[in-house]
Amino acid sequence: MRFPSKGTARRVRSQYPVGTRVELVQMEDAQAPPIGTKGTVKGVDDTASIMVKWDNGSHLNVVCGEDKCRKINETLCEFLKMNETAEIHIMSPGGYVDLNKERIEQLLNGKTVKAHPGDFQFCVNMAAEELLSQVIYNHNFHEGVHSLFTDYPQKENGE
């Protein structure tokens, strides 16, 4: 097996940051989780293999060039339940929202949170149900902080 370049490993790391939810598509290993198993990315190693903690308890890596997984567009609610103690910055259609452990708990309990357009002087209340139903379209994890870009779920049939 030929090892991927450092550039390939960097690209895979940027596409699958820590915390990204994935679904297994293909893995040729006797101990592989079943196809369709979901998991959370824990990192990407120097061979560009994606290190995943699978929801069924397995920790087998998705080997670059051999195995396949896909990102899952999950809702903010699903993400917060898996990351309840994290520091999270969100860019949503309703404005920027900054969350810590306390605010995540409040949001998951249905309380409104403050959103702003980039200036704290103009904060507005954002309803929990509005924010929690949004889908994460981009996720970055840097220096212990999750940065998310969310939007409303796509309507079916172009509605």
Image (tube, rainbow, N blue to C red):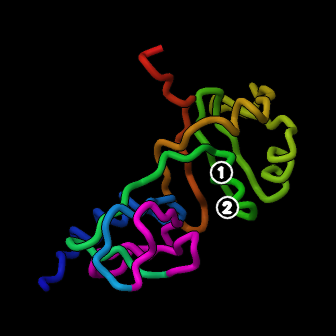
Seen in the picture, residue 10 relative to 23 is either above or below; the reply is below
Seen in the picture, residue 17 relative to 48 is either above or below; the reply is above
Residue numbers of the magenta segment: 31-58
Seen in the picture, residue 35 relative to 132 is either above or below; the reply is below
Q: Is residue 91 shown in magenta?
A: no
In the current view of this chain or complex, which residue is farthest to the top?
A: 159
Give how far across and how far down residue 26 sits, in percent: 31, 66
Which residue matches tag 2? 82
Q: Please name the amino acid that badge 2 sits on.
A: Met
At x 35%, y 61%, the residue is 25
Q: Please name the amino acid that badge 1 sits on.
A: Glu
Q: Residues within 10 Å of mark 1 (few under 14, many from 20)?
A: some
Which image quarter holds the N terminus?
A: bottom left
At x 49%, y 81%, the residue is 59
Nearest the viewer among 154 and 122 is 154
Q: Residues within 10 Å of mark 2 (few under 14, many from 20)?
A: few
Q: Secondary structure at mark 1?
A: helix
Query: Label 2 vs label 1: CA separation?
Result: 7 Å
Q: Secondary structure at mark 2?
A: helix
Nearest the viewer among 73 and 6 is 73
At x 55%, y 47%, the residue is 74
132 lies left or right of 48: right
Q: Are marks 2 and 1 in contact (CB under 8 Å)?
A: yes
Give how far across and how far down residue 43 sits, in percent: 45, 74
Quadrant of the image occupied by residue 111: top right
In the current view of this chain or complex, which residue is farthest to the left?
A: 2
At x 69%, y 46%, the residue is 77
Q: Please tell me how many numbered marks the rendered image carries.
A: 2
Mark number, residue 78:
1
Quadrant of the image occupied by residue 81: bottom right
Nearest the viewer among 153 and 12 is 153
